[in-house]
Amino acid sequence: MGLGGRRGLSLVGFPLLIPLGVFLALALDGNKLSSMAAAVRCDLFRGRWVMDPSYPLYNNSASCPFIEREFSCIHNGRSDLLYTHYRWQPLSCNLSRFNGQAFLEKLRGKTVMFVGDSLSRNQWRSLTCMLHSSVRPAPRFNITREGDVSTFTFTDYGVRIMLDRNVFLVDLVKQGAAGRILKLDSIQLGGKLWLNTDFLIFNTWHWWNRRGPAQPWDYIEVGKKLYKDMDRMVAFETALRTWGRWVDLNIDPSKSTVFFQGISPSHYNGTLWGEPEAKSCIGQKEPLPGSTYPGGLPPAVGVLKSVLRNISKPVTLLDVTNLSLLRKDGHPSIYGLGGRTGIDCSHWCLAGVPDTWNEILYNLIL
Ligand SMILES: *[C@@H]1O[C@H](CO)[C@@H](O)[C@H](O)[C@H]1NC(C)=O
Ligand SMILES: *[C@@H]1O[C@H](CO)[C@@H](O)[C@H](O)[C@H]1NC(C)=O
Ligand SMILES: *[C@@H]1O[C@H](CO)[C@@H](O)[C@H](O)[C@H]1NC(C)=O
Ligand SMILES: *[C@@H]1O[C@H](CO)[C@@H](O)[C@H](O)[C@H]1NC(C)=O
Ligand SMILES: *[C@@H]1O[C@H](CO)[C@@H](O)[C@H](O)[C@H]1NC(C)=O
Ligand SMILES: *[C@@H]1O[C@H](CO)[C@@H](O)[C@H](O)[C@H]1NC(C)=O
Protein backbone atom coordinates (compact mmCIF):
# COMPACT_ATOMS: atom_id res chain seq x y z
CA MET A 1 0.00 0.00 0.00
CA GLY A 2 1.46 3.36 -1.01
CA LEU A 3 1.50 6.70 0.73
CA GLY A 4 -2.04 7.38 -0.42
CA GLY A 5 -3.11 4.32 1.49
CA ARG A 6 -1.44 5.40 4.67
CA ARG A 7 -2.95 8.85 4.41
CA GLY A 8 -6.30 7.29 3.81
CA LEU A 9 -5.94 5.00 6.76
CA SER A 10 -5.05 7.85 9.05
CA LEU A 11 -8.66 8.80 8.51
CA VAL A 12 -9.50 5.88 10.73
CA GLY A 13 -8.50 7.91 13.76
CA PHE A 14 -9.71 11.28 12.46
CA PRO A 15 -12.71 10.84 10.26
CA LEU A 16 -12.97 14.59 9.66
CA LEU A 17 -9.34 15.45 8.99
CA ILE A 18 -9.28 15.20 5.17
CA PRO A 19 -12.46 15.87 3.17
CA LEU A 20 -13.67 12.75 1.41
CA GLY A 21 -13.08 14.19 -2.07
CA VAL A 22 -9.44 14.88 -1.28
CA PHE A 23 -9.13 11.44 0.24
CA LEU A 24 -10.60 9.77 -2.86
CA ALA A 25 -8.12 11.67 -5.02
CA LEU A 26 -5.29 10.36 -2.85
CA ALA A 27 -6.73 6.88 -2.94
CA LEU A 28 -7.14 6.91 -6.73
CA ASP A 29 -3.51 7.88 -6.85
CA GLY A 30 -2.66 4.65 -5.12
CA ASN A 31 -4.94 2.71 -7.48
CA LYS A 32 -6.55 0.83 -4.64
CA LEU A 33 -9.79 2.68 -4.35
CA SER A 34 -12.09 -0.13 -3.33
CA SER A 35 -9.96 -1.71 -0.61
CA MET A 36 -9.18 1.67 0.85
CA ALA A 37 -12.74 2.83 0.79
CA ALA A 38 -13.47 -0.33 2.79
CA ALA A 39 -10.67 0.53 5.22
CA VAL A 40 -12.12 3.99 5.73
CA ARG A 41 -15.57 2.60 6.42
CA CYS A 42 -14.10 0.21 8.95
CA ASP A 43 -12.80 1.62 12.21
CA LEU A 44 -10.23 -0.99 13.25
CA PHE A 45 -10.41 0.30 16.82
CA ARG A 46 -14.11 -0.30 17.23
CA GLY A 47 -14.77 -3.94 18.01
CA ARG A 48 -14.82 -6.64 20.65
CA TRP A 49 -12.66 -9.44 21.98
CA VAL A 50 -13.45 -12.96 20.79
CA MET A 51 -12.08 -16.29 21.95
CA ASP A 52 -9.73 -17.78 19.35
CA PRO A 53 -7.74 -20.89 20.29
CA SER A 54 -5.23 -20.15 17.51
CA TYR A 55 -3.88 -17.37 19.74
CA PRO A 56 -1.42 -16.47 21.28
CA LEU A 57 0.91 -15.79 18.37
CA TYR A 58 3.95 -16.98 20.33
CA ASN A 59 4.98 -18.90 23.42
CA ASN A 60 7.25 -17.14 25.84
CA SER A 61 10.09 -19.53 26.48
CA ALA A 62 10.22 -21.47 23.22
CA SER A 63 9.63 -18.75 20.67
CA CYS A 64 10.57 -15.59 22.53
CA PRO A 65 13.67 -16.43 24.57
CA PHE A 66 14.64 -12.78 25.11
CA ILE A 67 11.43 -11.61 26.81
CA GLU A 68 11.99 -9.57 29.99
CA ARG A 69 10.86 -11.02 33.29
CA GLU A 70 8.50 -8.13 33.95
CA PHE A 71 6.28 -9.03 30.98
CA SER A 72 6.72 -12.78 31.28
CA CYS A 73 3.68 -13.50 33.44
CA ILE A 74 3.66 -17.25 32.81
CA HIS A 75 7.28 -17.51 33.86
CA ASN A 76 6.37 -15.53 36.99
CA GLY A 77 3.72 -18.05 37.95
CA ARG A 78 0.51 -16.96 36.26
CA SER A 79 -1.41 -20.17 35.57
CA ASP A 80 -4.75 -18.92 34.19
CA LEU A 81 -4.11 -18.66 30.44
CA LEU A 82 -7.50 -17.74 29.05
CA TYR A 83 -6.27 -14.16 28.61
CA THR A 84 -3.78 -15.31 25.94
CA HIS A 85 -6.51 -16.75 23.68
CA TYR A 86 -8.39 -13.60 22.73
CA ARG A 87 -8.38 -11.97 19.32
CA TRP A 88 -9.55 -8.43 18.55
CA GLN A 89 -12.50 -8.43 16.14
CA PRO A 90 -13.34 -5.06 14.53
CA LEU A 91 -17.09 -4.59 14.12
CA SER A 92 -17.25 -4.10 10.35
CA CYS A 93 -14.20 -5.82 8.88
CA ASN A 94 -11.52 -8.39 9.65
CA LEU A 95 -7.90 -7.77 10.55
CA SER A 96 -5.35 -9.67 8.50
CA ARG A 97 -3.57 -12.14 10.70
CA PHE A 98 -0.02 -11.10 11.52
CA ASN A 99 2.51 -12.56 9.07
CA GLY A 100 6.02 -11.93 10.37
CA GLN A 101 7.70 -13.16 7.19
CA ALA A 102 5.69 -10.70 5.08
CA PHE A 103 6.44 -7.90 7.54
CA LEU A 104 10.20 -8.57 7.51
CA GLU A 105 10.23 -8.76 3.70
CA LYS A 106 8.25 -5.53 3.40
CA LEU A 107 10.54 -3.78 5.88
CA ARG A 108 13.82 -5.15 4.51
CA GLY A 109 16.56 -2.59 5.23
CA LYS A 110 14.18 -0.36 7.17
CA THR A 111 14.01 0.96 10.71
CA VAL A 112 11.09 1.03 13.11
CA MET A 113 11.55 3.09 16.28
CA PHE A 114 9.35 3.19 19.35
CA VAL A 115 9.86 6.32 21.45
CA GLY A 116 8.41 6.63 24.93
CA ASP A 117 8.12 5.00 28.34
CA SER A 118 7.84 1.37 29.45
CA LEU A 119 4.54 0.99 27.56
CA SER A 120 6.62 1.59 24.43
CA ARG A 121 8.99 -1.10 25.67
CA ASN A 122 5.98 -3.37 26.15
CA GLN A 123 4.97 -2.89 22.50
CA TRP A 124 8.57 -3.03 21.22
CA ARG A 125 9.14 -6.33 22.99
CA SER A 126 5.83 -7.68 21.73
CA LEU A 127 6.74 -6.85 18.12
CA THR A 128 10.18 -8.45 18.41
CA CYS A 129 8.59 -11.59 19.89
CA MET A 130 5.95 -11.70 17.13
CA LEU A 131 8.57 -11.34 14.39
CA HIS A 132 11.05 -13.75 15.92
CA SER A 133 8.48 -16.49 16.45
CA SER A 134 6.72 -16.23 13.12
CA VAL A 135 9.64 -17.27 10.93
CA ARG A 136 10.99 -20.83 10.89
CA PRO A 137 13.80 -21.54 11.40
CA ALA A 138 14.03 -18.62 13.84
CA PRO A 139 15.67 -15.63 12.17
CA ARG A 140 19.09 -14.51 13.34
CA PHE A 141 19.18 -11.37 15.45
CA ASN A 142 21.36 -9.26 17.67
CA ILE A 143 20.48 -6.77 20.37
CA THR A 144 22.59 -3.71 21.12
CA ARG A 145 22.14 -0.82 23.47
CA GLU A 146 23.63 2.66 23.33
CA GLY A 147 22.50 5.07 26.02
CA ASP A 148 18.71 5.06 26.04
CA VAL A 149 18.40 3.39 22.65
CA SER A 150 18.02 -0.37 22.31
CA THR A 151 18.24 -1.90 18.85
CA PHE A 152 16.94 -5.31 17.93
CA THR A 153 18.31 -6.21 14.48
CA PHE A 154 16.98 -9.03 12.33
CA THR A 155 20.35 -9.45 10.68
CA ASP A 156 19.23 -11.48 7.62
CA TYR A 157 16.71 -8.79 6.69
CA GLY A 158 18.54 -5.68 7.88
CA VAL A 159 15.37 -4.76 9.78
CA ARG A 160 15.98 -2.75 12.93
CA ILE A 161 13.29 -2.54 15.60
CA MET A 162 14.46 0.18 17.99
CA LEU A 163 13.37 1.59 21.31
CA ASP A 164 14.30 5.06 22.53
CA ARG A 165 13.42 5.34 26.20
CA ASN A 166 12.19 8.92 26.50
CA VAL A 167 9.30 9.22 28.92
CA PHE A 168 8.27 12.87 28.31
CA LEU A 169 9.37 13.35 24.64
CA VAL A 170 10.38 16.94 25.55
CA ASP A 171 13.82 17.65 27.05
CA LEU A 172 14.76 16.82 30.63
CA VAL A 173 18.14 18.38 31.47
CA LYS A 174 20.36 18.90 34.52
CA GLN A 175 21.04 22.61 34.89
CA GLY A 176 23.45 23.71 37.64
CA ALA A 177 21.94 24.69 40.96
CA ALA A 178 18.35 24.58 39.73
CA GLY A 179 18.57 20.82 39.28
CA ARG A 180 16.58 18.79 36.79
CA ILE A 181 14.47 20.90 34.44
CA LEU A 182 11.64 19.53 32.36
CA LYS A 183 11.49 21.87 29.33
CA LEU A 184 8.00 21.78 27.89
CA ASP A 185 9.02 24.00 24.93
CA SER A 186 12.07 22.09 23.83
CA ILE A 187 12.93 18.97 21.86
CA GLN A 188 16.68 19.11 21.23
CA LEU A 189 17.94 15.86 22.65
CA GLY A 190 15.62 13.17 21.33
CA GLY A 191 14.89 14.89 18.04
CA LYS A 192 18.28 14.07 16.57
CA LEU A 193 17.78 10.36 17.16
CA TRP A 194 14.36 10.24 15.54
CA LEU A 195 15.32 11.53 12.12
CA ASN A 196 16.15 9.05 9.34
CA THR A 197 13.76 6.46 10.74
CA ASP A 198 11.20 4.85 8.43
CA PHE A 199 8.49 4.26 11.04
CA LEU A 200 8.19 6.18 14.31
CA ILE A 201 5.72 5.24 17.06
CA PHE A 202 5.63 7.81 19.86
CA ASN A 203 4.02 7.62 23.29
CA THR A 204 3.98 9.62 26.50
CA TRP A 205 1.51 9.86 29.36
CA HIS A 206 2.17 7.62 32.37
CA TRP A 207 4.98 9.74 33.84
CA TRP A 208 3.13 13.06 33.81
CA ASN A 209 1.32 12.34 37.09
CA ARG A 210 4.35 11.19 39.06
CA ARG A 211 5.06 13.00 42.29
CA GLY A 212 7.52 12.74 45.19
CA PRO A 213 10.57 10.51 44.75
CA ALA A 214 9.11 9.03 41.53
CA GLN A 215 9.06 12.47 39.87
CA PRO A 216 12.31 12.80 37.90
CA TRP A 217 12.35 16.63 37.61
CA ASP A 218 12.74 19.57 40.06
CA TYR A 219 11.28 22.36 37.90
CA ILE A 220 9.17 22.73 34.81
CA GLU A 221 10.25 25.34 32.28
CA VAL A 222 7.78 26.89 29.88
CA GLY A 223 8.06 30.24 28.07
CA LYS A 224 11.50 30.79 29.69
CA LYS A 225 9.95 30.71 33.19
CA LEU A 226 10.57 28.08 35.85
CA TYR A 227 7.69 26.60 37.83
CA LYS A 228 7.89 24.39 40.91
CA ASP A 229 4.80 22.58 39.67
CA MET A 230 1.74 23.06 37.47
CA ASP A 231 -1.45 21.30 36.41
CA ARG A 232 -0.14 18.03 35.02
CA MET A 233 -2.72 17.77 32.24
CA VAL A 234 -1.73 21.26 31.04
CA ALA A 235 1.95 20.25 31.17
CA PHE A 236 1.17 17.10 29.17
CA GLU A 237 -0.76 19.09 26.57
CA THR A 238 1.98 21.73 26.27
CA ALA A 239 4.62 19.05 25.72
CA LEU A 240 2.47 17.29 23.14
CA ARG A 241 2.06 20.56 21.23
CA THR A 242 5.84 21.00 21.25
CA TRP A 243 6.16 17.47 19.90
CA GLY A 244 3.55 18.24 17.23
CA ARG A 245 5.57 21.28 16.13
CA TRP A 246 8.66 19.09 15.99
CA VAL A 247 6.80 16.70 13.68
CA ASP A 248 5.63 19.53 11.43
CA LEU A 249 9.13 21.03 11.21
CA ASN A 250 11.18 17.87 10.89
CA ILE A 251 9.25 14.97 9.41
CA ASP A 252 9.44 14.32 5.68
CA PRO A 253 6.35 12.18 5.08
CA SER A 254 7.94 10.61 1.99
CA LYS A 255 10.69 9.21 4.25
CA SER A 256 9.06 8.65 7.65
CA THR A 257 5.63 7.43 8.71
CA VAL A 258 4.59 8.70 12.13
CA PHE A 259 2.26 6.97 14.58
CA PHE A 260 1.20 7.86 18.08
CA GLN A 261 0.61 4.93 20.40
CA GLY A 262 -2.57 6.04 22.16
CA ILE A 263 -3.10 6.18 25.91
CA SER A 264 -2.61 2.73 27.42
CA PRO A 265 -5.08 2.41 30.31
CA SER A 266 -4.49 1.03 33.82
CA HIS A 267 -6.97 -0.95 35.94
CA TYR A 268 -6.80 0.00 39.63
CA ASN A 269 -10.43 0.95 40.21
CA GLY A 270 -13.11 -1.72 39.76
CA THR A 271 -15.91 0.84 39.98
CA LEU A 272 -14.98 1.80 36.45
CA TRP A 273 -15.74 -1.70 35.13
CA GLY A 274 -18.71 -2.48 37.34
CA GLU A 275 -16.94 -4.31 40.17
CA PRO A 276 -16.70 -1.70 42.95
CA GLU A 277 -15.07 -4.13 45.38
CA ALA A 278 -12.05 -4.63 43.08
CA LYS A 279 -9.14 -2.37 44.09
CA SER A 280 -6.90 -3.55 41.25
CA CYS A 281 -6.71 -6.04 38.39
CA ILE A 282 -5.71 -8.94 40.70
CA GLY A 283 -7.64 -12.09 39.90
CA GLN A 284 -9.17 -10.77 36.66
CA LYS A 285 -9.30 -13.64 34.20
CA GLU A 286 -11.56 -12.41 31.40
CA PRO A 287 -12.08 -9.26 29.32
CA LEU A 288 -15.25 -7.21 29.49
CA PRO A 289 -17.77 -8.36 26.89
CA GLY A 290 -18.93 -6.03 24.15
CA SER A 291 -17.38 -2.77 23.02
CA THR A 292 -18.07 -0.28 25.79
CA TYR A 293 -16.10 0.40 28.97
CA PRO A 294 -18.53 1.60 31.64
CA GLY A 295 -15.97 4.00 33.16
CA GLY A 296 -15.47 5.89 29.89
CA LEU A 297 -12.20 7.15 28.48
CA PRO A 298 -9.31 8.60 30.52
CA PRO A 299 -9.29 12.43 30.06
CA ALA A 300 -5.79 12.29 28.52
CA VAL A 301 -7.32 10.74 25.38
CA GLY A 302 -9.30 13.90 24.59
CA VAL A 303 -6.23 16.08 25.09
CA LEU A 304 -4.15 13.85 22.84
CA LYS A 305 -6.75 13.81 20.07
CA SER A 306 -7.13 17.59 20.11
CA VAL A 307 -3.37 18.05 19.76
CA LEU A 308 -3.10 15.48 16.97
CA ARG A 309 -5.85 17.24 15.01
CA ASN A 310 -3.72 20.36 14.87
CA ILE A 311 -0.65 18.71 13.32
CA SER A 312 -0.34 19.30 9.56
CA LYS A 313 1.89 16.35 8.70
CA PRO A 314 0.19 12.94 8.62
CA VAL A 315 0.24 11.25 12.03
CA THR A 316 -1.80 8.10 12.60
CA LEU A 317 -3.18 7.49 16.06
CA LEU A 318 -2.95 3.87 17.15
CA ASP A 319 -6.10 4.36 19.14
CA VAL A 320 -5.58 1.45 21.52
CA THR A 321 -7.34 2.90 24.56
CA ASN A 322 -10.81 1.42 24.05
CA LEU A 323 -9.71 -2.07 23.16
CA SER A 324 -7.23 -2.11 26.05
CA LEU A 325 -9.74 -0.71 28.56
CA LEU A 326 -11.77 -3.89 28.03
CA ARG A 327 -8.74 -6.01 29.02
CA LYS A 328 -8.73 -5.74 32.82
CA ASP A 329 -7.41 -9.35 32.65
CA GLY A 330 -4.33 -8.51 30.57
CA HIS A 331 -2.01 -6.99 33.18
CA PRO A 332 0.77 -8.76 35.11
CA SER A 333 -0.90 -7.92 38.48
CA ILE A 334 1.12 -10.04 40.96
CA TYR A 335 2.98 -11.85 38.17
CA GLY A 336 5.17 -8.91 37.19
CA LEU A 337 8.54 -7.69 38.37
CA GLY A 338 7.44 -6.75 41.88
CA GLY A 339 5.42 -9.91 42.53
CA ARG A 340 2.95 -9.55 45.39
CA THR A 341 4.56 -6.33 46.62
CA GLY A 342 4.22 -4.37 43.38
CA ILE A 343 0.80 -4.97 41.88
CA ASP A 344 1.18 -4.05 38.21
CA CYS A 345 -2.08 -3.14 36.49
CA SER A 346 -0.37 -0.73 34.05
CA HIS A 347 1.88 -2.91 31.89
CA TRP A 348 0.68 -5.94 29.94
CA CYS A 349 1.61 -9.60 30.00
CA LEU A 350 3.28 -10.96 26.86
CA ALA A 351 1.99 -12.75 24.93
CA GLY A 352 -1.02 -10.47 25.32
CA VAL A 353 -2.72 -7.17 24.57
CA PRO A 354 0.25 -5.32 22.92
CA ASP A 355 0.33 -8.10 20.30
CA THR A 356 -3.02 -6.74 19.15
CA TRP A 357 -1.65 -3.19 19.02
CA ASN A 358 1.05 -4.58 16.71
CA GLU A 359 -1.40 -6.63 14.68
CA ILE A 360 -3.28 -3.39 13.98
CA LEU A 361 0.00 -1.57 13.23
CA TYR A 362 0.79 -4.38 10.78
CA ASN A 363 -2.60 -3.92 9.09
CA LEU A 364 -1.94 -0.19 8.76
CA ILE A 365 1.60 -0.59 7.38
CA LEU A 366 1.23 -3.53 4.98
C1 LIG B 1 2.96 -23.04 21.90
O1 LIG B 1 3.19 -24.24 22.58
C2 LIG B 1 2.14 -25.18 22.46
C3 LIG B 1 2.46 -26.37 23.33
O2 LIG B 1 3.82 -26.71 23.24
C4 LIG B 1 1.99 -25.58 20.98
O3 LIG B 1 0.93 -26.47 20.83
C5 LIG B 1 1.71 -24.32 20.17
O4 LIG B 1 1.65 -24.62 18.79
C6 LIG B 1 2.79 -23.26 20.40
N1 LIG B 1 2.38 -22.03 19.73
C7 LIG B 1 3.23 -21.32 18.99
C8 LIG B 1 2.67 -20.08 18.37
O5 LIG B 1 4.42 -21.62 18.84
C1 LIG C 1 -14.66 -11.82 8.29
O1 LIG C 1 -14.32 -13.18 8.42
C2 LIG C 1 -15.45 -14.02 8.59
C3 LIG C 1 -14.95 -15.42 8.92
O2 LIG C 1 -13.92 -15.79 8.05
C4 LIG C 1 -16.30 -13.96 7.34
O3 LIG C 1 -17.44 -14.77 7.51
C5 LIG C 1 -16.74 -12.50 7.13
O4 LIG C 1 -17.46 -12.39 5.91
C6 LIG C 1 -15.54 -11.57 7.08
N1 LIG C 1 -16.01 -10.20 7.08
C7 LIG C 1 -15.55 -9.27 6.25
C8 LIG C 1 -16.15 -7.91 6.39
O5 LIG C 1 -14.70 -9.51 5.42
C1 LIG D 1 24.28 -6.63 14.56
O1 LIG D 1 23.91 -6.84 13.21
C2 LIG D 1 24.20 -5.77 12.33
C3 LIG D 1 23.63 -6.10 10.97
O2 LIG D 1 24.13 -7.32 10.49
C4 LIG D 1 25.71 -5.52 12.30
O3 LIG D 1 25.99 -4.40 11.48
C5 LIG D 1 26.19 -5.25 13.71
O4 LIG D 1 27.60 -5.13 13.71
C6 LIG D 1 25.79 -6.38 14.64
N1 LIG D 1 26.16 -6.01 15.99
C7 LIG D 1 26.65 -6.88 16.84
C8 LIG D 1 26.98 -6.36 18.20
O5 LIG D 1 26.87 -8.04 16.56
C1 LIG E 1 -13.00 4.97 41.40
O1 LIG E 1 -13.82 5.54 40.42
C2 LIG E 1 -15.01 6.11 40.96
C3 LIG E 1 -15.88 6.53 39.79
O2 LIG E 1 -15.22 7.45 38.97
C4 LIG E 1 -14.64 7.27 41.87
O3 LIG E 1 -15.81 7.83 42.42
C5 LIG E 1 -13.73 6.76 42.98
O4 LIG E 1 -13.28 7.82 43.76
C6 LIG E 1 -12.54 6.02 42.40
N1 LIG E 1 -11.80 5.38 43.47
C7 LIG E 1 -10.52 5.58 43.64
C8 LIG E 1 -9.87 4.86 44.78
O5 LIG E 1 -9.87 6.34 42.94
C1 LIG F 1 -14.53 4.24 23.23
O1 LIG F 1 -15.16 4.20 24.47
C2 LIG F 1 -15.93 5.34 24.76
C3 LIG F 1 -16.44 5.18 26.19
O2 LIG F 1 -16.87 3.88 26.44
C4 LIG F 1 -17.07 5.46 23.75
O3 LIG F 1 -17.80 6.63 23.98
C5 LIG F 1 -16.48 5.50 22.35
O4 LIG F 1 -17.50 5.48 21.39
C6 LIG F 1 -15.56 4.32 22.14
N1 LIG F 1 -14.89 4.46 20.86
C7 LIG F 1 -14.71 3.42 20.05
C8 LIG F 1 -13.95 3.71 18.81
O5 LIG F 1 -15.11 2.30 20.32
C1 LIG G 1 -2.82 24.98 16.20
O1 LIG G 1 -1.63 25.35 15.53
C2 LIG G 1 -1.51 26.73 15.27
C3 LIG G 1 -0.29 26.99 14.41
O2 LIG G 1 0.52 25.87 14.27
C4 LIG G 1 -1.45 27.49 16.57
O3 LIG G 1 -1.35 28.86 16.33
C5 LIG G 1 -2.73 27.19 17.35
O4 LIG G 1 -2.65 27.78 18.63
C6 LIG G 1 -2.93 25.71 17.53
N1 LIG G 1 -4.23 25.48 18.09
C7 LIG G 1 -4.42 24.61 19.04
C8 LIG G 1 -5.82 24.45 19.54
O5 LIG G 1 -3.50 23.98 19.50
Image (spheres, helix red, strand yellow):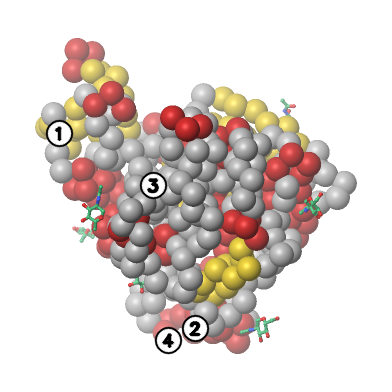
Rendering coords of residue 246 (x, y %): 35, 47
In whole angstroms, how far apart are the C-alphas of marks 1 and 4?
46 Å
Per the image, the residue denoted by label 3 is 280
In whole angstroms, how far apart are the C-alphas of marks 3 and 1?
29 Å
Q: Secondary structure at mark 3?
A: loop
Q: Secondary structure at mark 2?
A: helix
158 or 43, nearer to the observer: 43
In whole angstroms, how far apart are the C-alphas of marks 4 and 3?
47 Å
Per the image, the residue denoted by label 2 is 41
Q: Which callout, 4 or 2, points at the residue further toward the start of the chain? A: 4
Tell me which amino acid carries mark 4.
Gly
Q: Nearer the viewer, mark 4 or mark 2?
A: 2
363 or 122, nearer to the observer: 122
Res 152 → quadrant:
top right
Per the image, the residue denoted by label 4 is 21
Tell me which amino acid carries mark 1.
Asp
Q: Is mark 3 within 8 Å of ligand 4?
A: no
Q: Residues within 10 Å of mark 2 (few under 14, many from 20)?
A: some
